[in-house]
Amino acid sequence: MTDSPDKVVKSDTEWRAQLSDLAYKVTRKHGTERAGSHDDFPKQPGTFHCVGCGAPLFDQAQKYESGTGWPSFWTPIAPDAVGTREDRSLFMRRTEVHCARCESHLGHVFPDGPQPTGLRYCMNGVAMTFEPRE
């Protein structure tokens, strides 16, 4: 099913057993949580991980307040941490962001973020967990 030993592939039944109903809807069915509905993540240094497979996705130092109601970052923790693809759902043309390791839908990236990248990775909070740095 996959050509990389690092890829995580599970059946729909396995994903449903692992994830909350909302996390399943967002990560596996490309849903979106309501803006401002996810508990705010701590402000201390740490790493945001994929709720599906635990892969590191974003660093707290790359997070900023975008005013959108969703956690926003100006870059992923590493260039190969996330993947993107065109999303033409809802009669719009957007760039979907997913976990490179397990393909969990995380959110979308937009070209209206801060420098140095000018990008806004607008993520669903329910698609990530936070691990503080010791």
Image (spheres, helix red, strand yellow):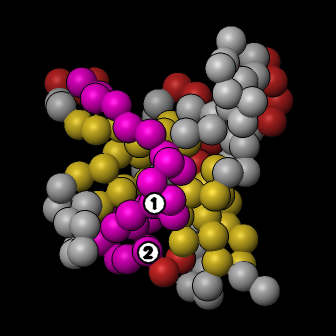
Asked whether, in this view, residue 89 is left or right of residue 97, the answer is left
Image x and y of residue 33, in percent: 47, 47
Labels 2 and 1: the sequence-earlier one:
2
The residue shown at (63%, 70%) is 47
Asked whether, in this view, residue 101 is left or right of residue 34, the answer is right
Locate the N terminus by quadrant. Answer: top right
| Label annotation for residue 76 | 1
Locate the C terminus by quadrant. Answer: bottom right
Image x and y of residue 12, in percent: 72, 18
Q: Which residue is mark 2?
A: 62
Image quadrant of residue 133?
A: bottom right
Question: Is residue 70 visible in this depiction of the protein?
Answer: yes
Asked whether, in this view, residue 68 is left or right of residue 107, the answer is left
Pointers 2 and 1 in contact (C-beta within 8 Å): yes
Question: Considering the numbered disc 2 on the image, is that residue within a helix, a strand or a loop?
Answer: helix
| Label annotation for residue 9 | none
The residue shown at (82%, 30%) is 17
What crowding class fits label 2: few (fewer than 14 Cα within 10 Å), some (14-19), or many (20 or more)? some
Three-letter residue code for mark 2: Gln
Q: Is residue 3 magenta?
A: no
Q: Which residues are magenta?
A: 62-88
Distance in Å between CA atoms under marks 2 and 1: 8 Å
Nearest the eye: 6 or 87: 6
The residue shown at (37%, 77%) is 64
Three-letter residue code for mark 1: Pro
